[in-house]
Amino acid sequence: MKNLSFIFLILISQFVYSQSIDGQIGDIEEKIISWRHDFHKFPEVSNREFKTSEKIARHLESLGIEVTRNVGVNGVVGILEGKSKGKVVALRADMDALPITENNGLPYQSVNDGVMHACGHDGHMSILMATAEILSKNNNFTVKSVENISTESLMNTVNKIVNFGWKKEAVPVINPKKSLIARFFSALFD
């Protein structure tokens, strides 16, 4: 968990000038582990993340974050309005699991036959939920949390977000030296 604390510290320290961030992360460390194990044990494949998206939406709402459900199919968008105006930060995580059978004997091994989190999305969701929790306590800037607006089709994702109304004039530009997704999100929030 030291690596997780380091990731949080770097992300949050860019925007929050609180002496208590390490303590706040430590306070929810067990919760983060529990979320990850739960997501791992009950994985759902792309466009079927009904329980997963509901769990995330309920957590964000419990923090006082404005939530929109079913963006795209099961996407969740949370908006945490900051105290000060200015640039907006978007944080994003995938929710979908893969159609792979898990057979490792872990106590949190997938109970869904033929489906598992094999590429880290369970951890990504847990980190984003924890980040939202920390940021909601240190609310100095606006954050848009985007959970799994299907990335299997990039243009599908772009259209869903533009139709969501964040920035109508944002148009992705193909640049092989820089991620199209990164350029698109950069255009959205500049």
Image: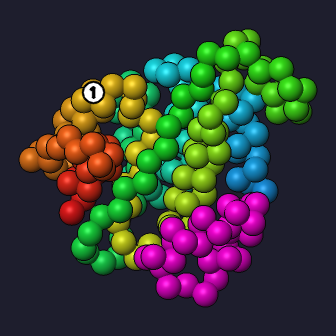
Q: Quadrant of the N terminus?
A: bottom right
Q: Nearer the viewer, residue 186 or 57?
A: 186
User: Residue 82's spot in the image, x, y percent?
Assistant: 36, 70
Percent coordinates x, y for residue 20 in the rendering: 64, 82
Q: Dot 1, how many residues are within 10 Å of its Cα: few (below 14), some (14-19), or many (20+)?
A: few
Give the overall secondary structure of the magenta segment: helix
Q: Is residue 11 magenta?
A: yes
Q: Is residue 116 left or right of residue 141?
A: right
In this rendering, position of residue 18 left or right of residue 110: left
Q: Position of residue 76 (x, y in %)?
A: 43, 39
- Residue at 66% from the left image edge and 30% from the top image edge: 117
Q: Residue at x 68, y 61 (%)?
A: 4
Q: Residue at label 1?
A: 156
- Look at the image and give the residue range highlighted in magenta: 1-29
Residue at 22% of width from left, 53% of height from top?
188
Up-down relation of residue 76 to residue 65 (above or below): above
Q: Secondary structure at mark 1?
A: helix
Residue 16 image offset from top left, x and y in percent: 48, 79
